[in-house]
Image (cartoon, rainbow, N blue to C red):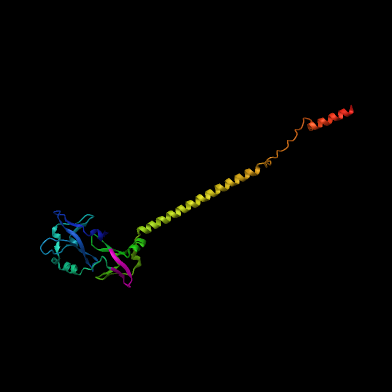
């Protein structure tokens, strides 16, 4: 497919002598064939400055830089061909035309059309509404097979929803990417939070277990009394008070 916007302002070059015959200013549409019939040049040479046409059958190729023809003889005056002269004067305007379905529904206006560079057949229309709608929802593309009429006031298409599709807009693609990224970040956050919670729980559980195993500490300022160490015979070790009592008893006996 070749886009119509690429076509306008391209130079038309003769392959025979390399001469530029003019630049593409417009197109002549054959409404019955729903195809390009000729290219209109911005030819301004000569006294009468009559518009010149390049019949589609004389076009060799459509390139990115130029449209090529075999020789300069491919360029014709409007009145040289009665058929082209009639189409030139009655050629419907496709770009900017309203698009309606057969049941009277409005679909939008034509911003661009696509055609087959080998046959000139129009095989697609790109519609647009408001700039905001195009950015948010994308542009509507209609296949050429559903076009029934190309008129001066409107382009009529069949009421075939299967042949109507939406092109993704930059904003919708961005929104989709942001949504996917947000979901991925949310999942990662959930996993990280879960692992962190498990780690904290294990640390608290370990700390609690170690605390329960330790003996209770003595109160501050009240040292514990030391227990007397047992002697080798198993009897308690005599204290200083016991020695004094023993001495008193011995004196009484004496």
Nearest the viewer among 93 and 161 is: 93
Q: Is residue 179 left or right of residue 60?
A: right
Secondary structure character of the magenta stretch overall: strand
121 on left or right of 222: left
Report if residue 127 lies within the magenta region: no
Does 241 appear above or below 204?
above
Which residue of the protein is positioned furthest toward the left in this rendering?
Answer: 47
Residue 243 image position (x, y, % from top left): 81, 30
Any part of residue 68 in sight: no
The residue closer to the viewer here, 203 or 118, is 203
Q: Quick one: quadrant of the N terminus?
A: bottom left
Q: Is residue 113 above or below residue 16?
A: below
Q: Left or right: where does residue 223 sit relative to residue 239?
A: left
Q: Residue at x 62, y 46 (%)?
A: 208
Q: Which residue does the image show at 34% across and 63% down from the upper left? A: 132
Does the magenta-highlighted stretch encompass residue 103?
A: yes
Front residue of 194 and 55: 194
Please state the horizontal and vertical placement of residue 145, each as a whole percent of the image: 29, 66
Q: Which residues are magenta?
A: 98-111
Q: Quadrant of residue 133?
A: bottom left
Q: Total of numbered circles in the picture?
A: 0
- Residue at 45% over, 55% down: 183
Q: For residue 252, say whether it is visible.
A: yes
The picture places residue 71, in percent across and down from the top left corner, at: 14, 57
Where residue 247 appears, x then y in whole percent? 84, 29
Q: Residue furthest right?
A: 253
Q: Quadrant of the C terminus?
A: top right
């Amino acid at each position: 497919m070749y886009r119509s916007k690429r076509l306008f302002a391209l130079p038309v070059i003769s392959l025979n002598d390399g001469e530029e015959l003019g630049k593409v200013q417009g197109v002549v549409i054959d409404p019955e064939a729903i195809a390009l019939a000729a290219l209109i040049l911005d030819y301004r040479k000569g006294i009468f400055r009559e518009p010149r046409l390049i019949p589609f059958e004389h076009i060799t190729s459509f390139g990115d830089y130029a449209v090529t023809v075999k020789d300069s003889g491919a360029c014709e005056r409007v009145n040289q061909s009665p058929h082209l002269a009639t189409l030139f004067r009655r050629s419907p305007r496709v770009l900017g035309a309203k698009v309606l379905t057969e049941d009277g529904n409005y679909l939008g206006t034509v911003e661009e059309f696509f055609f087959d560079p080998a046959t000139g057949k129009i095989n697609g229309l790109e519609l647009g509404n408001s700039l905001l709608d195009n950015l948010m929802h994308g542009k509507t593309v209609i296949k050429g097979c559903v076009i029934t009429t190309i008129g001066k006031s409107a382009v009529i298409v069949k009421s075939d929803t299967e042949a109507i599709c939406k092109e993704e807009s930059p904003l919708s693609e961005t929104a989709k990417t942001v949504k996917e990224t947000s979901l991925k970040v949310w999942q990662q956050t959930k996993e990280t939070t879960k692992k962190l919670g498990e780690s904290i729980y294990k640390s608290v559980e370990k700390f609690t277990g170690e605390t329960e195993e330790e003996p209770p500490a003595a109160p501050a300022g009240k040292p514990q009394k030391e227990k007397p160490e047992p002697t080798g015979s198993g009897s308690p070790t005599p204290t200083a008070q016991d020695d004094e009592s023993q001495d008193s008893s011995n004196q009484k006996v004496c």
